[in-house]
Amino acid sequence: MSSAEAVAPVFDIETGLQELVARGYQFVHPADERGEVLAVVGVRVHDDVVDVVRLNAEDDVVATRMPGSEENIFEPERWLWRRRGEGAQVLTEILSLPDAC
């Protein structure tokens, strides 16, 4: 078990999102043809990595850290770290990662 997996949820979703913004994540809100938001997606490029967080629902959040060389950050071929699950837990874990790999 990694240290990130052992971290109990510290951030609720709203606080976690605020912390992501404070750390420089940029957000987009993909929508369907009716304008309904499908997800909230945050991306941060730093050091030699890219972090992506996709919130589909409060209980369906995916966070990925990948090498900066990945061509498609929404469907990477390689990743350095990845979690899927409850929003509070996943946000706590990605916010617990060190900036540099």
Image (cartoon, grey):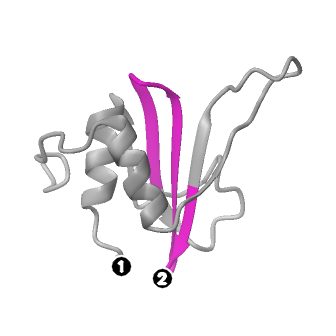
Q: Which residue is mark 2?
A: 47
Q: Classify residue 50 as left or right of residue 20.
A: right
Q: Which stretch is magenta?
A: 43-64
Badge 2 amino acid: Asp
Q: Classify residue 91 as left or right of residue 79.
A: left
The residue at the point 58 percent across, 73 percent down is 68
Magenta: predominant secondary structure element? strand
Q: Nearer the viewer, residue 67 or 94?
A: 94
- Residue 96 pos. (x, y %): 24, 59
Disc 1 and disc 2 in contact, CB within 8 angstroms: yes
Label 1 – label 2 distance at C-alpha: 6 Å
Q: Residues within 10 Å of mark 2 (few under 14, many from 20)?
A: few
The picture quadrant where one finds residue 65 is bottom left
Q: Residues within 10 Å of mark 1 (few under 14, many from 20)?
A: few
Does the stretch in magenta take in 52? yes
Residue at the extreme bottom: 47
Please tell me how many numbered marks the rendered image carries. Answer: 2
User: Reading the chain from its start, which is encountered first: label 1 or label 2?
Assistant: 2
- Residue 87 pos. (x, y %): 36, 33
Badge 1 amino acid: Ala
Q: Classify residue 84 as left or right of residue 25.
A: left
Could you say whether the residue bearing mark 1 is in a helix, strand or loop? Answer: loop
The vertical placement of 34 against 8, above or below, is above
- Residue 57 pos. (x, y %): 49, 23
Number of the label disc, if any, that sits on residue 100: 1
Could you say whether the residue bearing mark 2 is in a helix, strand or loop? Answer: loop
